[in-house]
Amino acid sequence: MYCKCDSLRDATAVFELVACERIAFPWNILIAANAQRGQSRESIALYRRMSCEGVKPNAITLVSVLGACANLEDLKTGREIHRSHVLGARSRPYERPMPVDAVMATALVTMYGRCGSVADARAVFEGICGRDLAAWNAMVAAYSRNGQMAQAVLVLRRMAVEGVRPGEGTFVGMLSWCCTVGALDEARSIHAHILATGLESRPTVGTTLVSMYGRCGSLGGAVRAFQRIRDKDIVAWNAMIAAYAQSGHSRDTIRIYHVMDLEGVRVDKVTLIGVLDACASLALTSKTRLVHARIVDTGVELDVVLGTALVNAYARGGHLVDADLVFAEMEERNVATWSAMVAAYAQTGHPDRSLEMYREMQLQGLRPNYITYVSILFACNHAGLLDHGLGYFASMGRDYGIESCEEHCSCIVDLLGRAGRLDEAEALMASVPYRLGISAWMCLLGACRTHGDVERGSRVARRAFQVESGEVAPYVALSNMYAGHGMWDEVSRVRQLMANTLDKSTGKSFVEIDGRLHEFIQGDETHPEKDSIQANILELELDSPTVPLFHRHHSEKVAVAFAMLKTSGEIPLRVVSSLGICHECHAFMKGISKRCRREIVVRDAEMLHRFDGGSCSCGR
């Protein structure tokens, strides 16, 4: 009774009163209860104590203990049980052999498969007489878990030959492995077998397909699998939300959330966390407030995961007061929660408060992680705290054993570059043991432009082209650097190279007006109001008549011009850009924030920029 009520402490107390009786029954109950609740080590310890006290285990005991061995991947103990109670008993004629039925054999196959000993799993499997579906599923799972998908498919074919119809569990393990390693081709082959069995519409199989396609980057496959699920439950809806999120389709995440409401689906914490992450990526504060209100109205517990998602959504939208209020209300905070607040202040132009939050986090006894340090170094960078930044960079590995990554290196390169220490920045980039992406090279290129080092800047730009050939930013930065030094032939050459090399329709920006999200793609000429938008851009650029034409099609600039046409002067403009805002667009925003007296908030790929009165929170 106590075990069924999840009260293992009381169950153990009662067990100790009857353990002196040399029968397996009470031992089996407690061993199974611990194994089923993830207390696998306790199960094995009870099994060993049982043997020491002279109580003979039976098949029920061993099935539970083998399950515990599988959970812990404890091959040594599992093999010991197999040899002692199954193989060993057969070699001792004076002992009554342990009956090995399909349940026991399946437990052995599962244990060997989970422990990576596929040969042993197959040997046990081949010895099973009258295999049931569970035994076949265990063998398929053993091959799948260990990456032997060709062998798993052969087992499927053998099942068909022997007249065994696969069940849902047959395919779920195979698809889960494909999810883990991103094996899309193998997953499609398995999907073909699922179609042949007609199981695709079952919620468990269909949901696993949605998750698999989502994690493997095939959003179309995920959508088709989702549409074919009959009687979708909340797990299926959440899998579809996750698939959209993993593919960067935040707008679709919010759309499907509204569809769930229309269809009367009761959302849970997983749903709300997925939607809040989408709101954060698009800086949709109005939607964040609606989700927050729903959490309050429905009495959903604001646990550490949901609370952190809410803090992050408010912070990414630039609403630090709301983020602070939610943070203060949370009864439990983990390193992710504190890191979200550290990042919020760092990315909104409050580096001092960001570092203060970091110190408070340390006083709470929490160890920072690599994400925390990205925000700390970012804060030092934008506050110009060179010595502090270098100190934190050194302490990261020395004090906490955190290995630096590209984001950390980019911050330090930017910090050194702003201080004019270009040799040190370039030396650091050459010394790190990992491949640097476009961000670090752009930091150094920007520093070369600022400090007039054209020769180094040209060399750095060439490296940036090699790292990310389709990225527009290094071409623009190099062109601007040449223009700043009157090197017009070089400017023409870079612009021609850019025209021949790049697909300029890469940048996207979003702006929310009256509850509707508008999307703008760089270089897109199909917007129905493009003429009025471009006319407004020209009018707003009165102070910068020499701005190149291609800058007038940058998505964030188009989004701001459109929003100014559609909103009144007292409403702040909020734009989300998929790329980093370029120097010219940054200057454009600063200029119109002063001339038009409009507050403009732009969240780009790096940080949140708040333009007001001709200045920006980033300090540029």
Image (cartoon, rainbow, N blue to C red):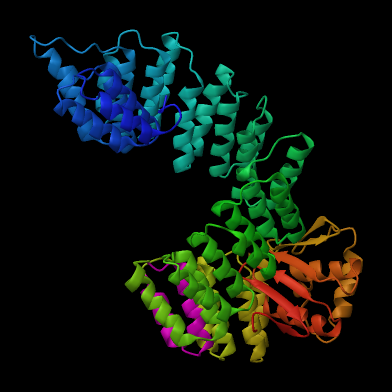
- Residue 53 lies, in percent from the top left, at 15, 26
Tell me if residue 493 is in the magenta stretch.
no
Q: In this view, does 334 lie above or below 127?
A: below
- The quarter of the rendered structure image containing the C terminus is bottom right
Q: Is residue 593 above or below residue 26?
A: below
Q: In this view, does 39 lie above or below 573?
A: above
Q: Magenta span: helix, strand or loop, mainly? A: helix
- The quarter of the rendered structure image containing the N terminus is top left
Q: Is residue 596 left or right of residue 188?
A: right
Which residue lies at the image location 35% right of the left edge and 32% below the top edge?
34
Q: Is residue 357 left or right of residue 519?
A: left
Q: Can residue 375 be seen in this view?
A: yes
For the record, the magenta segment spans 403-432
Count of marks, rendered view = 0
Residue 85: quadrant of the picture:
top left
Q: Can residue 578 be seen in this view?
A: no
Q: Is residue 112 left or right of residue 448?
A: left
Name the residue nearer the viewer: 157 or 47.
47
Tell me if residue 424 is in the magenta stretch.
yes
Which residue lies at the image location 75% right of the left edge and 68% below the top edge?
556
- Residue 133 lies, in percent from the top left, at 42, 15
- Residue 448 lies, in percent from the top left, at 54, 86
- Residue 380 lies, in percent from the top left, at 51, 81
Residue 515: quadrant of the picture:
bottom right
